[in-house]
Image (cartoon, helix red, strand yellow):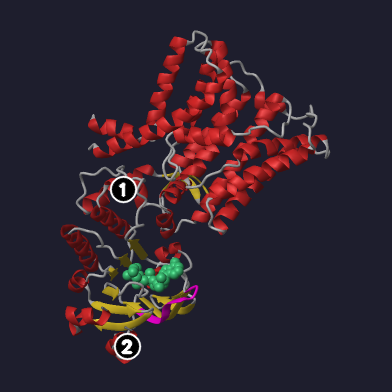
Amino acid sequence: MQRILKTLLSRPEITAIIMLGLVIIGFTLYAPQFATYANSRVMLFALPELGIIVLGVGILMIAGEFDLSVGSVFALVPMVIVVAVGRWGFDPYSAMALGFLAALAVGYVNGWITLTFNIPSFVTTLGMLFMARSLATVLSGGFPPPFPSELPIAVFVADLGLFRSSMLWFVGFALILGITLHYSNLGNWIFATGGQQQAAADMGIDTRRVKMACFMLCSFLAGFAGMITTFRLRSALPSLGEGLELQAIAAAVIGGTALTGGIGSLIGFIVGTGLIRVIDNGLVMARVDANWFRFAIGALTIVAVILNIWVRNRARRMH
Amino acid sequence: MAEILREHVLPKDRFVQPGPNALIRCVGLEKWYGGVHALVSVDFHAESGEIVGLVGDNGAGKSTLIKVLSGAHPPDAGKIYIDGDEVQLRTPKEAMARGIETIYQYTAMVPAMSIARNMFIGREPLSRFKIGPFGLMDRRTMVDHATRSLSNIDLTERSPDTPVEELSGGQRQSVAIARAMYFKSKLLILDEPTNHLSVKETNKVLDYVLSLKEQGIGSIFISHNMHHIFPIADRIVAMARGEKIADIMKSDTSIDELTELIV
Ligand SMILES: Nc1ncnc2c1ncn2[C@@H]1O[C@H](COP(=O)(O)OP(=O)(O)OP(=O)(O)O)[C@@H](O)[C@H]1O
Ligand SMILES: [Mg+2]
């Protein structure tokens, strides 16, 4: 019994799961419209777009690095796609390939600069936050380009009733990345690299390549999520996703990912994302002034970290 | 300081020479870190099954030498022979593939990861589901072997899923040694393995090194504590300022003589 409890409390996502449960119960009691089919739809429509970003940001954090540029990549990639089709005459799929190539390039540059000059990724990706945003704006030419109708919107955002097809992409990414992170040797290398880089390197792991792959994955997923949002809105806005990087990091942290690397879980990423989406929506349903949203997320982040550390220490002292 | 050391340096012709079947032998190793000459034409060898004690003051170049031998830092010049064949050790993997396992004091393990996962970092057994070098880990095998290794080092009360950060320093060192034993190394390199350990835990580590010798596995053992090294070593190599200043069979020297030499 003690052992089961200890195992349970040692899971990084445990506090987030409990908090999500409490928040859902709270909103259900106080906001009659919250737990309805219509409202669940609203929440599930929005979840994948943040969730896909959090997968990348969280895995990169486990590997011991940060990415503040995801919000800008979120705008840049769909801008490339839309402009490539609308102004440069690309067919939709080549344009999407070009967009993802741009995302991978941003991730590569983030990683290359960070690892080659041995500077904090916080700094590199802060720089990239400005540069990628600027590129998106320059590409747009100052005003949102017309949205080309030939883009395969349905594949990514078709309304399937309770959720959109974006949910299927999210679940697909989550499954593949979850299995990779927790059950494959590559996942073991990611945890080892973020947990104690020297130890990983001493055991023959190419930590530079592991981190590089995580940087590129992170940018790719941010761009992919941005494309989904753009397809849903049918408009490529250069200002899309401003501040999203902080929400994504908050979601990962709330889900139990350690800022210092080496600790985190895929379930944590999902539950952390869920908490942010539920609170966003629940406050509206409870008729609270929407401007309290960021206050709630901020407070939640701090509380989650304090609880996480407390629970982890308690679990460690149990036998 | 340099003069005093030089006075005590044994004439080079009195250094113990490698036998014809030396497990590892290096000639003329050089290593520069920027302007620091960390290894100055170092010759070094270890016979199979031999315990070599490596001593020297802080900054003498001991860790640098073993980093070269473990493939972590390639040398700038010099040759390395393993079992008589000249080898290039460019990465730790290449050294491990040739049976050289290294254990570092502070970075031997990833604290937040479980014992089972730590044992197989970089060498995870894979299941049927794999693509190229990547695949799903064979968790069953990992847990089984970790459990067996834990019982070899009398840590049976710990589950292989325990995070390493919950172990004491000595227990971590034991797990690191168990890992080296599991991978059937020919030579184990231990960089200050007894630092910060209690007397009891220190003795345990020394006992492992001795029992490995009984199984034919030699060790290179670095320590600042002559009383840890002397009882178990067959031969002592002393370094100062990147040079080898002594290479002598234990039976030909004493703790006092060695202490005087390196302090
Ligand atoms: N990665 C590095 N970069 C730059 N200089 C280094 C590096 N590693 C070692 N050195 C320098 O090389 C010299 C030898 O260092 P080394 O770590 O081999 O000494 P050591 O004998 O292991 O000392 P200690 O007993 O303190 O561990 C020192 O002057 C050290 O400052
Ligand atoms: Mg050292």
**Magenta-drawn stretch contains B29:** no
Determine which residue is flagged by label 1: B164
In the image, what residue occupies the spot 27% across and 72% down? B49
Q: In which quarter of the image is the C terminus of chain A?
A: top left
Label 2: which secondary element: helix
Determine if marks 2 and 1 fall on one subunit.
Answer: yes
- Give the residues in magenta: B33-44
Mark 2 to mark 1: distance in Å?
A: 46 Å
Q: Report if residue B68 is visible in the image.
A: no
Residue A31 falls left or right of residue B180? right
The single residue placed furthest to the left in the displayed view is B200
A144 on left or right of A253: right
Quickly name the residue at label 2.
B3
Give the residue displayed 44% in from the left and 62% down from the top: B93
Q: Nearer the viewer, residue A197 or B196?
A: B196
Q: Position of residue B186 (x, y in %)?
A: 33, 67
Q: Does the magenta stretch include residue B35?
A: yes
* Kind of residue at disc 2: Glu
Residue at 68% x, 36% y is A75
Q: What residue type is labelled 1?
A: Val
Estimate how packed mark 1 is, as few (under 14), some (14 to 19) or many (20 or more) residues with alpha carbons within 10 Å. many
- Earlier sequence position, callout 2 versus callout 1: 2
Q: In the image, what residue occupies the spot 45% across and 18% down?
A: A24
Would you identify the image quadrant in which residue B194 lies?
A: bottom left
Q: Which of A293 and B245 is in front in this view?
A: A293
